[in-house]
Image (cartoon, grey):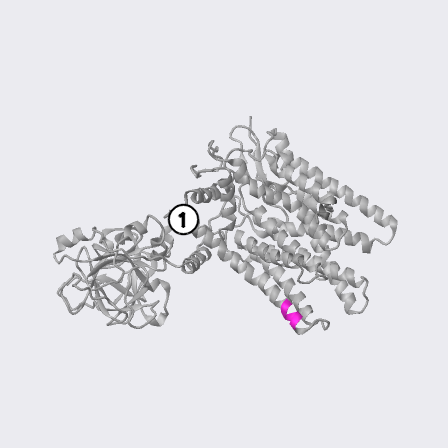
Amino acid sequence: MLEFLKRPVVVTADINLNVVALTAVGLLSRLWRLTYPRAVVFDEVYYGQYISFYMKRIFFLDGSGPPFGHMLLAFGGYLGGFDGNFLWNRIGAEYSSNVPVWSLRLLPALAGALSVPMAYQVLLELHFPHCAATGAALLLLIENALLTQSRLMLLESVLIFFNLLAVLSYLKFLNSQDRPFSPSWWFWLTLTGAACSCAVGTRYTGIFTYLLVLAVAVVHAWHLIGDQTLSNVRVLCHLLARAVALLVVPVVMYLLFFYVHLILLHRSGPHDQIMSSAFQASLEGGLARITQGQPLEVAFGSQVTLKSVFGKPMPCWLHSHQSTYPVIYESGRGSSHQQQVTCYPFKDVNNWWIIKDPGRHQLVVSSPPRPVRHGDMVQLVHGMTTRFLNTHDVAAPLSPHSQEVSCYIDYNISMPSQNLWRLDIVNRESDTEVWKTILSEVRFVHVNTSAILKVSGSHLPDWGFRQLEVVGEKPSRGSHESMAWNVEEHRYGRSQEQKERELELHSPTQIDISRNLSFMARFWELQWRVLSLRSDESEHKYSSTPLDWVTLDTNIAYWLHPKTSAQIHLLGNIVIWASAGLATVAYLLLFSWYLLRRRRSACGLPEDCWLRWVLAGVLCAGGWAVNYLPFFMMEKTLFLYHYLPALTFQILLLPVVLQHISDHLCRSRLQRSLFSALVVAWFACACHVFIMLRPLTYGDTALSPSALRALRWKDSWDILIRKH
């Protein structure tokens, strides 16, 4: 009965000692003295702020990419018990005792360390020998820029890790086609999609590797369709499995990243103003505290503030004040000399307006309230001056092709008031929809001229207090978000007398209406804001162009010791960078040559070698191209670290080309021996450069001025030489 207990349980496992050794040295190189320097290093000043926001559950918006990478860094802070209390305001600032530097830098370091054995595995899966695979791993190990970037609280090493994991997983899946639909087959296919999603979730540039893997998968699926040995049902199952793993899984995971992000960051923060009023009201504190208890439906007599939905060039509210437009503008054109109407980027009592029924004189809400609906005629009365919002056939101050918008002052001249507006609810579900606080996006269409109330985006001169210009735009020019407004703050007006009404504008009502946005609504808005948020395009001291990266004509001084000459620089191993560039050129020339010979039916390579050569080139040379060439079209400030994902693929291509030359171009044993000796000598030079640049990689050695001058191989390298 218990026969199985009479025999010992034996577990056998194949352990690749190369992988173990490469993992060990990778961990040693990345984790050694990880807490040094105990100071803010370059972009840690930005990522640290986001980590603090996560620790305090405060909402923030970062235009550099999706939240998954930031959440990984924050997870490191959580593991170290970080409470978020540190002022991230200066590069070089010493970390206080409550900042767990080791755990904050741990995950990027682990990602960089594990990329080393992963490079080895990628070349093995491409069916290259262990020698070439080990060479690829060692090159990643001793590449100074990759080492520097992975030892800091930065995201490039995480992005590279997921890029390599996606390629490795797909190759594993591709090599398991003899066991379709087996557990390992499903595991590697699903892991491919998951890794691609993680890469995109870390940085949007991760989509380049995702598209590359997807393109290779499409080509393989196309060949699968033509396989006559498979039944139609079998082919359909293969295609559905790939669609689910490579399309559905990444999308679901990408949504999950934002879901967790929004669940964690539920408190109001410094970036709220960029978001819509509805989004702000869904956060604890801030606008949610101000708008709590507001009526949902806007009625005749309601007191409201109107926020521009567009939010550019900055969030602002419809505003007026006692000042009037100049009689004559600087350009010589005349104005109506009416009361100014602007869009003001701060909350102010002059942002309040009263929604008036044109057929009645009352400025209070009746009992029961009469809600305003789509298509209703309204008048907008400025709360503090009781003047009506008006526009007429007078050119706007800075936009002469648009109409001036003002609050009407009766000067007893032949310029009658034109203050009727038709309410147009843009996001309505029916033509009888009621105007809702926060949720409704509305346009105000002038009845007399059909002009639409709009923020032009231009700043008025000093006479307009540098506030944003508001104009009446003809509808023939097309609709735009700058024409849409939403009610942010809302009161039911009860006082007919002006003095009492001014006091009433500051008194909240007590009707509690829930305005919780759905996750998808918040996701789409946050996604749009992230993609449309323009980063600072000003020139940076260490910014560079994509052409500078290939030739390593640039570096970045990450950290300088305040007292000694010790410093950390993002500086690549010039031997590896130059050799990787030459390998790319060599691959393209050889590929073109082989392609021409095959066209002439002079196949110099066996078919299996040719297919391996093509696949290696598509993934390695293609990986370099898709991660490098798009930067030529990007209008943003670029730095050397943007090149590191492309460089990683280029480094993988280097041993591929060297192995191919040894196997197929060196005809005799003597040639192979000489070529091997040259490769060994070249690798020794790369190691020598790594050792020479090591003080600038780890920053733990104070070098003399002469030693620093010796390391300044290019005039473009900004290496600080202190005078003692």
User: What's the residue type where badge 1 is placed?
Assistant: Phe
| Residue 364 position within the rendered picture, expressed as x and y whole percent measured from the top left | 16, 61
- Taking 413 as reference, is 350 left or right? right
How many numbered marks, from 0 up? 1
Which residue lies under the disc numbered 1?
Answer: 59
- Taking 610 as reference, is 157 left or right? left
| Residue 466 position within the rendered picture, expressed as x and y whole percent measured from the top left | 30, 52
| Residue 566 position within the rendered picture, expressed as x and y whole percent measured from the top left | 57, 31
Nearest the camera: 504 or 235?
235
Residue at the far front in the pictured view: 1
Residue 419, compared with residue 84, is above or below; it is below
Nearest the camera: 119 or 233?
233
**Residue 107's quadrant in the figure?**
top right
- Taking 3 as reference, is 152 left or right? left
Residue 334 is at least partly visible in this image: no
Nearest the camera: 359 or 265?
265
Residue 451, compared with residue 13, is above or below; it is below
Question: What residue appears at the point 34 percent right and 70 percent down from the top-left corner?
Answer: 429
Q: Which part of the image, by quadrant, shows the C terminus?
A: top right
The reply to whether the magenta stretch includes residue 107 is no
Q: Which residues are magenta?
A: 233-237
Label 1 crowding class (10 Å Cα cut-off): few <14, some 14-19, many 20+? many
**Magenta stretch prevailing secondary structure:** helix
